[in-house]
Image (cartoon, grey):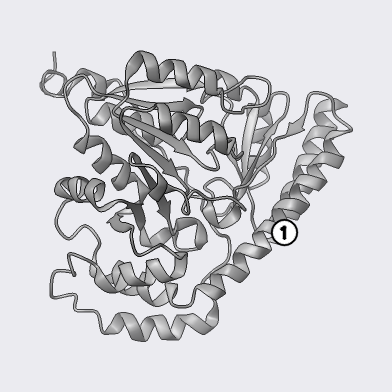
Amino acid sequence: MSAVGGVIRSEIAALAAYHVQDAAGYIKLDAMENPFPLPDGLCEGLATHLSKAAVNRYPDPAAGALTKALRNAMGIPKELDILLGNGSDEIIQMLTMACAKPGAKLLSVEPAFVMFKMIATFCGVTYIGVPLRAADLRLDVDAMLAAIAEHHPALTFLAYPNNPTGNLFDREDIRKIIRASPGLVVIDEAYFAFSAQSFLDEISQFPNVVLMRTVSKLGLAGLRLGLLIGRRGWLAEVDKVRLPYNINCLTQAAAAFLLENIAEFTVQTKVLIAERATMIANLGRLFTRFPGTMCFPSEANFVLIRVPNATAVFAALKARKILVKNTSQSHTLMRDTLRITIGSPAENAAFLTALTSILETQYA
């Protein structure tokens, strides 16, 4: 046995590291990013603002100015507290660490955001995945309630909308899960800006619910900033496992300044929502020509499609310098699927042209 093999936990050694594809030179439609650069009108102001950051000092541990900017930009009620993380990933990790008693279990649906399962493994918590309904990838509420009754999870994660499927689960089904859960229920609203629905106005009604968001999909992915919203009692406990100064001073300064100009990003979001509708309509027309293809409904900034030989289609798109996410191997329910981030109008048009050509060749 090697020295490494003798020290590293077996469940960690069995994992593959989270892989990020090199996207240089590609039309990048694989990571649910906002495709638009920072508006020109904000660049100079941001540069001036950042030049005043005290990089010689540790950052504000409470991130006061940034927290205020987030509260104003997202309309977060005063009775709810905010806890910040280095992206949503760190928040998931803090939540899991705080609840990682011996024998603790973390419950979610499958397929879901891969980091729910990975971070459970990191923290030594048993992960329980409940498959979505095979026919339409909707929430199987009866199976979820049965899993809660059997496993008594300390944590339950539900993404709203879900990633990688893009759909919104039924609100009443989520309420049933909340009421049945003995532990904490975390509603992940990473794609809140692209959805007409949110649980922000409901979480104060439940004693065991917190809500997670990020600014990444708004166009600030490079800042790595996530937030947890909920009752003070829950957040105060989770805060105990937060590493000191986890939000650096440049992220704090940049995010606070940019969120004061949230209207600029709202304009971009509206463009992407319109582009999503156009993409879904165009895919719907295209797929009438090719049996076995379909596009799933989406309330996020991406769409999930099913095409025969998805891995071959993925490779053909990549050969045309278009990078999407090949989700076909991620779960049995995701067979022959690709996840397409909504890009700029030109990027979306290039993708549709390439996909049309690929399918015409495949079906010839």
| Label 1 element class | helix
**Quadrant of the frame with the C terminus:** top right
What residue sits 39% from the left and 67% below the top?
A: 71
Which residue is identified by label 1? 274
Q: Is residue 3 left or right of residue 279?
A: left
Front residue of 23/223: it is 223
Snapshot quadrant of residue 47: bottom left
Snapshot quadrant of residue 14: top left
Residue lying at the far front in this picture: please name it: 205
Q: Is residue 101 left or right of residue 252?
A: left
What residue sits 46% from the left and 49% below the top?
A: 202
Snapshot quadrant of residue 346: bottom right
- Which percent across, then down, holds residue 42? 48, 81
How many residues crowd around disc 1 within 10 Å: few (fewer than 14), some, or many (20 or more)?
few
Residue 254 in the image: above or below residue 21: below
- Which percent across, then down, holds residue 145? 46, 20
Q: Is residue 113 left or right of residue 40?
A: left
What residue sits 28% from the left and 56% below the top?
A: 83
- Which percent across, then down, holds residue 254? 36, 73
What residue sits 33% from the left and 60% below the top?
A: 79
Front residue of 232/195: it is 232
Residue 18 in the image: above or below residue 216: above
Q: Amino acid at mark 1?
A: Ala
